[in-house]
Amino acid sequence: MLKCWMSAFTHINLQLISVRGRGVGEVKVEPLTRQLVVVHLSDVHFGDHHRFSPGKAVGAGNLPKAGHPTLADSLLRDLAVADPDCPVIVCITGDLVETGTARELRHAADLIKQLAASDILGRPRGLENIFVVPGNHDLCFAEEVAEDRWAPWTAFHNRAFGKTADSQDPASRFSFHNRIADLGAVILCLNSAEYVQKDTPEAKRGTIDQFQLTRIKEFLKSIPAKDLDSAIRIALIHHHPVLIPGLAESEQGYDAVSNAGYLLNELRTFGFHLVLHGHKHTPYHFSEDSFTAFREENSPPILIVAGGSVSSKEIRGSGQNCYNRLAIKWNPEARQGRIHLSTRSLKIEDRGREILPGEWVWTDKLIDDRQYLGGPRAPQTFAAASRKFSDGEDGADEVIRKRRYAELRLNMPVCEVMPSLLPGQHNEVRLWIEPHRPEHQKDEDKPLRAIWSAGNLHEVIAVSREQDERYCATMNYYGPMLVQVRLEFSDGEYAHGHVYARMPVAYQRPDRTIDIG
């Protein structure tokens, strides 16, 4: 298992293969996979309840600010780690401020500019790699006219990103980005807060209207299908697109996105991998993989990730401020994806005692590593013929099979293949020893050590019994390979086993019958 988020990029068990020889003048081979790292922030809430603002002094005024860290200071210190050697983006899913005032929004603009200019995971990422959507707190809640509600947000967005949008234009408050050429990704920045207004039914819930849905579909259809299929596809929205108040906030009633069904249908149709949102200040995440018998085709699940709140003091229950880091790998040929999620939590206390703000640190609170497979995971059995076992016809083969058990002393090498999170590599194979009928194994039958190898392009990996009773190892590879394990026993004997690390593909049934795997 991955010990920490960055280990996916630094734990290298082989030499990278990016060139295949063609005699004189070798040609670099285009990787068949896409990889992207996402830093996901949400619910910043510059204002009276912003975590990184100095508190109130006794009497009038605020505490002195000298030495008090800003949110940017804290985040950039936590993000000062090695470059993952793949594209990196920052996504902010709304509620940058608390009341939508010009003063609060200036703080938000300063944060974005500082993030754009500073090192994030090894180097500056620039404004072009920061994506922001508005939340319900980012507009002037009480104004009746839409233009007035959105004027401060529009001014902020124009100032932060160098835009010239008009607050009278609803289309300026959402944006769609075809960044396949440089990021290998398509990113939708949606506006679920368009109709949020005080003392109306829309005060607490989000909406994606038919105008925005139509524009989403037009944009996605405009991208050649082959290009879109090759891309990592991400949607950003503030309000939660599926109903979760019973989990995050009891007795809240319906406050998920209106028209969420239409939205999720479109995202499924165009094969989206990830939806990032905020709003609840609670870092839930789960797969949306509902299917109906009447749909003519089905897509892989969509991972829906709520960002929690990175810096609001208004957190329910025993929650903490947090943000997410995600590493995404997509193999379009196999229709196989992998999303590694790390939720980083802000530690402001130690054993019940407050820590000085300058010593607050972010730590891993949760790590989740998920694989997503589109379509059948194995070929269909449609031509095989079976018969009863025959001692006369099959006995000799059975002797060989049982001899193999004995040679390996019931220690069977097995593997699981998944997309690699190592840039430049195609797949990762997780290797381990599975004991067959362990109740029949004697202690001397358990290997002292397993040595995994796969030729001169790969490092040789040794795992002792004391280190790991499963003798687990990981290799990353660009092409299929036969992996060998040498099992060494206490009596000085040894045995060799083999397992094949394949190149996954998306298998189709010959009759085209739908099979969701």
Image (cartoon, helix red, strand yellow):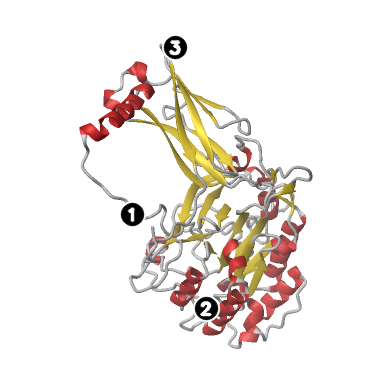
Tag 3 near tag 1, CB within 8 Å? no
Q: Secondary structure at mark 3?
A: loop
Residue at mark 2 to residue at mark 1: CA–CA distance: 49 Å
Looking at the picture, tell me which residue is in the foreground, 78 or 14: 14
Residue 422 in sight in this render: yes
Q: Secondary structure at mark 2?
A: loop
Mark with earlier residue (2, 1): 2
Q: Amino acid at mark 1?
A: Ala
Q: Give neighbour class at mark 2: few <14, some 14-19, many 20+ (Cα, 10 Å).
A: many
Residue at mark 3 to residue at mark 2: CA–CA distance: 68 Å
Is residue 27 shown above or below 175? Answer: above
Tag 2 near tag 1, CB within 8 Å? no
Mark with earlier residue (3, 1): 1
Is residue 98 shown above or below 173? Answer: above
| Image coordinates for residue 318, horizontal then vertical, percent | 45, 52
Q: Which residue is mark 2?
A: 208
| Image coordinates for residue 160, horizontal then vertical, percent | 74, 68
Q: Secondary structure at mark 1?
A: loop
Tag 3 near tag 2, CB within 8 Å? no
Q: Amino acid at mark 2?
A: Ile
Q: Which residue: 61% across, 33% down?
A: 458
Q: Which residue is mark 1?
A: 383
Query: In the image, which is nearer the foreground, mark 2 or mark 1?
Result: 1
Q: Which residue is mark 3?
A: 492
Mark with earlier residue (3, 2): 2
Query: In the image, which is nearer the foreground, mark 3 or mark 2?
Result: 3
**Residue placed farthest to the front in the image?**
392
Q: Which residue: 69% across, 47% down?
A: 85
Looking at the picture, tell me which residue is in the foreground, 201 or 267: 267
Q: Give neighbour class at mark 3: few <14, some 14-19, many 20+ (Cα, 10 Å).
A: few
Is residue 27 shown above or below 392? Answer: below
